[in-house]
Amino acid sequence: MNRVLVVDDNVINLKLACDILERENFDVIRATSANEAIAILEEDIPDLVLLDIGMPGMDGYMLTQKLKSMEKTRDLKIVALTASAMKGDDSKAFKAGFDGYLTKPIDTRNFCSSVRNFINAEKENKSKKK
């Protein structure tokens, strides 16, 4: 079963993303802040992190840079899940270390397949490295 950590400070957005994933049999972990996400990742590493960029305190950019600098989470696949969809926002996310980029509002018809594609691509990369 694919395990996904969803990090979003907006409880409505968090619930929607998690409900959609759970309906498609993903094992979902929820966090409402960067600090909560860090605490979860100290205990458990999921297949993928869906991370909101615009959070108070430590935003998604800072959290991604922190996670990519830590040995335990360096190879963690992190995908931006954001309402920031202006021209250039995706390249800014990739420069910050995100591995993928999905926009809100969530396209409920394609959301799970997009998430699954990110996870499958990561699993293929890991098997090629062996």
Image (tube, rainbow, N blue to C red):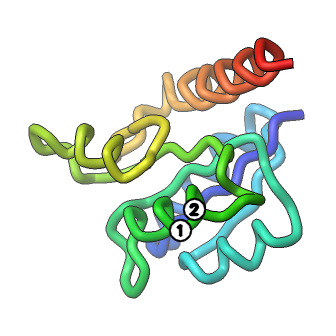
Q: Are marks 1 and 2 in contact (CB under 8 Å)?
A: yes
* Residue 130: image tag: none
Foreground tag (1 vs 2) = 2
Which element type, helix, strand or loop, lies under badge 1?
helix
Look at the picture and state if 37 lies above or below 73. below
Look at the picture and state if 9 lies above or below 18. below
Name the residue located 79 percent from the left edge and 49 percent from the top edge: 46
Name the residue located 65 percent from the left edge and 19 percent from the top edge: 121
Disc 2 packing (10 Å; few <14; some 14–19; many ≥20)? few
**Camera-side residue: 108 or 113?**
113
- Residue 76 percent across, percent down from the top left: 67, 47
Disc 1 and disc 2: Cα gap in Å? 5 Å
The residue singled out by tag 1 in the image is 66
- Residue 91 percent across, percent down from the top left: 24, 38
The residue singled out by tag 2 in the image is 69
Disc 1 packing (10 Å; few <14; some 14–19; many ≥20)? some
Say which quadrant the C terminus sits in. top right
Tell me the kind of residue under disc 1. Lys
Which element type, helix, strand or loop, lies under badge 2?
helix
Say which quadrant the N terminus sits in. top right
Tell me the kind of residue under disc 2. Ser
**Camera-side residue: 103 or 38?**
38
**Camera-side residue: 23 or 43?**
43
Look at the picture and state if 112 lies above or below 28. above
- Please give left or right for residue 104 compared with residue 3 in the image: left
